[in-house]
Amino acid sequence: MRIPINLASEPFRRDRPILLASAVVSVALVATLVLLVYLALLDREQLQSLRGDVSHLQTRLRVVQAEQARLDAVLRLPENATVLERSVFINDLIDHKAISWNRIFTDLEKTAPYNVRITALHPTIDSRNQVMLDMTVAADQPEGIQDLLKALEASPVFGYVYQHSTLPPTQAEPQYRSRITVPYDQKL
């Protein structure tokens, strides 16, 4: 039997580089698959651990909520109502007494421009235990009040200024007056 070898009609094929590249890509894909399986198993373990922690915390939360409900029921008893009202009143007094007038005036003195007078100041405490200053200010020019608003907002101890109203000068009051409210960063 004769083996026909005719290079002109059947040229020599170079399959070795393609086979080698296919083998390298296959090894890389298998390595990637092993890495992804490992990461998936690791993620599953972490997820089970987190689920255990969440269920433990939910159990503790239910216990604390049950205790809170029990204590609230005791506080709502008629014989305890007067004590509760009195303690709320005393706590409110303590909170109002904790406001430092000296610190308020020192911070306002550092912040307010020289041409603005503070004619009324009323500090209050909101539901988040934050001190709010309700002020009435006066100035000869409206620019003085605007300078005060900018200075309060730029100060680190005051927050966003809410301007309620501005009144022009009258015969009885020769200055521009404005009522503003500003949060004050004083910890109680």
Image (cartoon, helix red, strand yellow):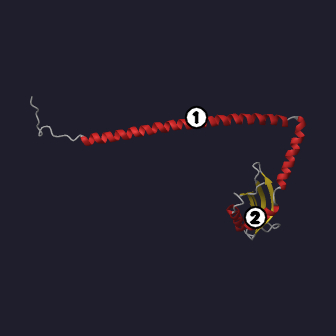
Query: At which x and y percent is residue 103?
Result: 79, 62
129 over 150 or under it: above or below:
above
Q: In this figure, which residue is indicated by the disc labeled 2?
A: 107
41 over 157 or under it: above or below:
above
* Residue 48 circle label: 1
- The residue positioned 84% from the left and 55% from the top of the image is 97
Quadrant of image for the C terminus: bottom right
Which secondary structure, mark 2?
Answer: helix
**Pointer 1 or 2: first along the chain:** 1
Query: At which x and y percent is residue 11?
Result: 15, 40
131 over 118 or under it: above or below:
above
Q: Residues within 10 Å of mark 2 (few under 14, many from 20)?
A: some
Quadrant of image for the N terminus: top left
**Residue sitting at the far left:** 2
Determine contact: label 1, label 2, CB under 8 Å: no
Amino acid residing under circle 1 = Gln
- The residue positioned 67% from the left and 37% from the top of the image is 57
Which secondary structure, mark 1?
Answer: helix
The image quarter containing residue 171 is bottom right
Amino acid residing under circle 2 = Asp
Query: At which x and y percent is residue 167?
Result: 76, 62
**Residue sitting at the far front:** 1
**Residue sitting at the far top:** 1
Q: Is residue 136 left or right of residue 24?
A: right
